[in-house]
Image: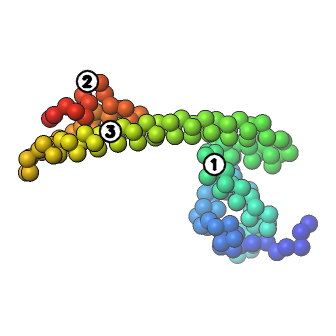
């Protein structure tokens, strides 16, 4: 057993860089074991909870879901070795991130082209008249590509 004194919620939250509400949420979702309580009801976390909360935070930052973490932490806490599952989750998140980046790069190019077209459209539009710029956004597909039927060049 460790000689370190248990931590109250506020202390743990401060050391881990989260709020006490976040700690309670982690407990409810099964990411953080429910700690014992003092007679007055205060939670008393082991010092090792700081490292666990930091692991949870980094995993969430890396794209793991709360459900992913709850599952693998439950298995790990039961003595299992969920490493292959952790690897699979991380690989899936990387693939998803690569796809999002590809879509964002395409969207950036589409917006560059649209802004160039809008600049030309605005130069031809008399002051006080609508150029239909906002309407042209409706021609963008969710992935960022313009629709062939109603591209940004079409006047409205």
Q: Which residue is mark 1?
A: 62
Which mark sits nearer the N-terminus, 3 or 2? 3
Marks 3 and 2 in Cβ contact (< 8 Å): no
Q: CA distance from mark 3 to mark 2?
A: 17 Å
What is the residue that sits farthest to the right in this orientation?
Answer: 1
Q: Mark 2 packing: few (<14 Cα in 10 Å), some, or many (20+)?
A: few
Quadrant (top left, top right, bottom left, bottom right) of the C terminus: top left
Instruction: Give the number of the mark in front: 3 or 2.
Output: 3
Badge 3: how crowded within 10 Å, few (<14), some, or many (20+)?
A: few
Looking at the image, which residue is at 75% across and 46% down?
Answer: 74
Query: At which x and y percent is residue 110?
Result: 36, 37
Residue 151, how many percent across, how many down? Answer: 26, 30
Give the quarter of the figure containing the N terminus. Answer: bottom right
Choose top left, top right, bottom left or bottom right for residue 96: top right
Q: How far separated are the C-alphas under marks 2 and 1?
A: 39 Å
In-front residue for pair 91/156: 156
Who's the residue at 12% across and 42% down the image? 124
Q: For numbered disc 2, what is the local secondary structure?
A: loop
Distance from disc 3 to disc 1, alpha carbons, whole Å, reads 32 Å
The answer to which quarter of the image holds residue 58 is: bottom right
Q: Earlier in the sequence, mark 2 or mark 1?
A: 1
Instruction: State the image coordinates of residue 118 (x, y, percent, origin top left).
Output: 23, 43
Q: For mark 2, what is the residue?
A: 149
Image quadrant in which you'd find residue 2: bottom right
* Residue 10 vertical placement versus 32 (above, below): below
Packing grade of label 1 (10 A; few <14, some 14-19, many >=20) is few
Q: Which residue lies under the disc numbered 3?
A: 113
Q: Residue at x 16, y 34 (%)?
A: 155
């Amino acid at each position: 057993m460790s000689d370190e004194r248990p931590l109250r919620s506020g202390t743990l939250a401060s050391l881990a860089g989260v709020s006490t509400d976040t700690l309670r949420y982690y407990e409810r979702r099964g990411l953080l074991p429910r700690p014992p309580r003092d007679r007055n009801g205060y939670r008393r976390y082991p010092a090792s909870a700081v490292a666990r909360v930091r692991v949870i935070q980094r995993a969430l930052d890396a794209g793991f879901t709360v459900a992913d973490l709850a599952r693998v932490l439950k298995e790990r806490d039961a003595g299992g070795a969920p490493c292959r599952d952790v690897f699979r989750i991380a690989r899936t998140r990387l693939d998803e991130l690569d796809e999002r980046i590809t879509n964002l790069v395409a969207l950036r190019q589409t917006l560059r082209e649209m802004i160039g077209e809008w600049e030309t459209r605005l130069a031809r539009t008399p002051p006080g008249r609508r150029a239909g710029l906002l309407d042209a956004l409706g021609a963008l597909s969710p992935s960022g590509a313009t629709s062939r039927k109603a591209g940004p060049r079409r006047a409205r």
